[in-house]
Image (spheres, helix red, strand yellow):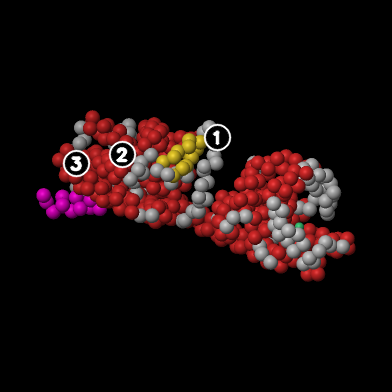
Amino acid sequence: MSLSTTLLAGIIFLVAIFFSMLGQGGGVLYTPVQVLFGIDFHVAASTSLFLIMLASLSSTLVFRKAKKVDWSLALVLESVTAVGGFIGGFTSGLVSGETLTGLFSGLVAFAAIFMIHEFKHASKPLTAKNSWFYWQRSFNDQHYAVNLLLALPVSFLAGACSGLVGVGGGILKVPLMVLLLGIPMDIAVGSSALMVGLTAAGGFAGHLTAGHWDWQISLLLGVVVFAGGQIGARKSLALDSRKMKKMFGWFLLLIAIIMLVKNVTVRGIVWPFHPSGIFIDGLAAKPVIYLSTSLVLLGLALYYNYRLRQNILKNHISTAQLLGVAVALRDHGTAMHNFRVTYAASRLGEVMGLSKRSMQGLMKGAFLHDVGKIGIADNILKKPGKLEPAEFILMQRHVELGVELLTDGDWFHDALDIVRYHHEKYDGSGYLQQLRGKEIPLAARIFMVVDVFDALISKRPYKEALAFEQAIKMIKQQSAHHFDPEIVTAFCSIAKELSDEVHGNEEQLKQRLMEKRIRYFGI
Ligand SMILES: [Fe+2]
């Protein structure tokens, strides 16, 4: 074996290890590496597909043993991707190769940045989705739901994109599966290894028919790739999925840069289903380089803008928390009431089918409902017994004070419904505006039930805590008087479970609230 063949085998070995760690076939690099070593492009392309198949087979064997391959998922998504790939490849002749590569490198860079950045997900965000188009998957103790209305068109588009730009489907599969479809990273990587292999098998069959295959070089590199695939897949299983996701992001960024460079330096790119045979010719073109660079820069700008907005949001949430806790400490000596009612309001809001935006207002308002108490004198706020009528009027001022305090901050505007109306009553006997029925905003009607219920089952300086059954009885008695009957019914359906959740371990409650925060605020 010559030195250059040995060197080629060594490089292919390293590529196979790295790509299989990421659930990839390796087609993006196998062909250019062979061409670099003077192998004919046609032969390099068919060998590359053969290698992708082997790498896929090799790593699928490892992932299968570790139960990371969701076979049904892979087959369903892959069948649609293949159709998209065929159509993409078939129509790619209409668009110039360098334009497609330039565009695609921008898209890949964009996807890369979103993989490198750490996204937070609530621990079980998908289990509640029961619509017919959610395909519930239970796999290796992981539960997730795939939105088929999204997954099938996206898989088709991913296939079509791969077909158009002339790379194997692997580059798009994992990020789409993780970011868009919510499939756990390890299962996405494990399943995509199989999917990439299936795509390559289709392409390889075409090349075999066309007589492009050099079995000798394929077999030599095949052994190397199979071994690399075994090592890579095992390494991948030992990595935690956070690291894997970041690594994948850097890998995508690398691919984006390679594609940009390749657009200028390498003559062609490969796509197995391309009607002209195999190649889409690509020649250096300045406008395309400018366009591609602009796309990468746009991706970076959008990413930093996103980061900035996330930081601002984080600061807003911290401010809200600080305010709410400060007032609660003065009022009750603990902020647990705020945590409890915010969590309970979010649970009840979910039962009432509130939108994500309304949930944000509900949670902010619940946490800050009594923020105006900061301006109420101690002798009234902390009076152990019942307030005199004149004192009660002064106490009612906390509603106005709260509204005044939050009116200037745009971010708090959706919290105002609760701050302003949380002491109204359904029959119009509340304060300050004596609104009645549905005149009271929904968020306030939801909040008043959980607020009163929490007050009933909590010990206060002037009263003992009521038992759960007694408190529920009082809430039911106040249906249509103090509370909206519809909301009372919804509340009763979750009251027992909710009461156990909010009165258990404090740390657990904060953790549950954090999950809601991530779900509705994304941070
Ligand atoms: Fe209040």
Q: Nearer the viewer, residue 387 or 422?
A: 387
For label 2, the crowd category at 10 Å Cα-Cα, with few meaning under 14, some 14 to 19 and many 20 or more, is many
Q: From the image, tell me which residue sits under label 2.
A: 197
Which amino acid does the dot numbered 3 rest on?
Ser
Task: From the viewer's perspective, tell me whether residue 432 is left or right of residue 489.
Answer: right
Magenta part of the chain: 1-15
Report whether the residue tagged 2 is closer than 8 Å to ligand 1: no
| Most distant residue in the left direction | 1
Q: Earlier in the sequence, mark 1 or mark 2?
A: 1
| Most distant residue in the top direction | 209
Label 2's element? helix
Foreground: disc 3 or disc 1: 1
Q: From the image, tell me which residue sits under label 3.
A: 218
Task: From the viewer's perspective, tell me whether residue 374 is left or right of residue 59.
Answer: right
Which amino acid does the dot numbered 2 rest on?
Gly
Label 3's element? helix
In terms of secondary structure, what is the magenta stretch mainly?
helix
Residue 499: x and y, percent? 64, 50
For label 3, the crowd category at 10 Å Cα-Cα, with few meaning under 14, some 14 to 19 and many 20 or more, is many
Q: CA distance from mark 1 to mark 2?
A: 32 Å
Task: From the viewer's perspective, tell me whether residue 55 is left or right of residue 296.
Answer: left
Residue shown at 83% from the left, 44% from the top: 427
Report whether the residue tagged 3 is closer than 8 Å to ligand 1: no
- Circles 3, 1 touching at the beta carbon (< 8 Å): no
Q: Nearer the viewer, residue 428 or 120?
A: 428
